[in-house]
Image (cartoon, rainbow, N blue to C red):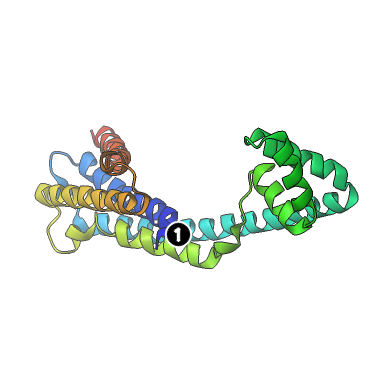
Amino acid sequence: MQEFLKQIVFGGNDGIVTTFAIVAGFAGAAADGVAQIGGMAVLVFGLANLFADAVSMGLGEFLSLRSQHDLYRSRRQSELAEIARDPEQERMELFEILRQRGMPPGEADTATELIARHPELMADLMMTYEFGLQDPDNENPVVSGLFTFFSFVIFGAIPIGPYFFLPPDFQTFVLSLISTFGALIALGLLRWHATSERLVRSVGETVLVGATCAAVAYGVGFLVGA
């Protein structure tokens, strides 16, 4: 699960923000009586945005990873060709990289000679330290896209959940607000558990981003409905 933390956090956070923005926007537009808008409108717009954006996010993650795979393979093939065409120049580049990373000259020279005997390994090192590219083969574009999609849908359904069962009054909006912050806190705790970052930072940043987006949506709805 930890290897898909990025997809879960990004998908979940965007899902929460997207659907709560709908709720907050409607509530802001009818701040003097949320029921004027109607719960059906909140559900229709909320669900439409939820699934449309979930598909967009999932496909976006899929295409992004596919592009990373293609870029890495293309760049690595070029690097292997350069090693075969001008091995001395590539050895000098690797030597400088090892020096810059703190290896003494004598050891860097020895390590370069050893690594240069293995072009595949040399290419991998050059990809990481010269071009800053990591091998994406461990990341499956389809699986990553599905994690993003389902994380978006699961977390994004929370803000509109109360409107399935309760009338669209101010109390329901408050319950949606509480549920939304609960979901953001849960997402922050998941991030904290997976990364071992400071608890306050993990939860605080997640909640702050969601709260900012919610406040903007409510404010825009209030101005439009005024």
Foreground: 66 or 107? 107
Residue behind mark 1: 3
Q: Residue at x 16, y 46 (%)?
A: 34
* Label 1 crowd (10 A; few <14 / some 14-19 / many >=20): few
- Image quarter hosting the N terminus: bottom left
Between 88 and 159, the one lying in front of the other is 88
Which residue corresponds to the image point at 56% horizontal and 63% vertical from the top-left? Answer: 138
Instruction: Tell me where residue 5 sits by quadrant.
Output: bottom left
Q: Residue furthest right?
A: 85
Name, please, the residue furthest toward the left. Answer: 171
> Quick one: SS at disc 1?
helix
The residue nearer to you, when weighing 117 against 164, is: 117
119 is higher (above) or lower (below) than 209: below
Q: Residue at x 11, y 47 (%)?
A: 170
* Residue found farthest to the front: 106
Q: Quadrant of residue 154?
A: bottom left
Quadrant occupied by the C terminus: top left
Between residue 163 and residue 138, name the one nearer to us. Answer: 138
Q: Quadrant of residue 88?
A: top right
x and y percent of residue 38 in the render? 19, 54
Measured as percent of width and height from the top left, residue 80 is found at 80, 54
Can residue 75 be seen at all in this image of the molecule?
A: no
Picture coordinates of residue 26, whole percent (x, y): 25, 46
- Total count of labels: 1
- Is residue 210 visible in the rendered structure shown here? yes
- Give the residue displayed 25% in from the left and 54% down from the top: 42
The kind of residue on which mark 1 rests is Glu
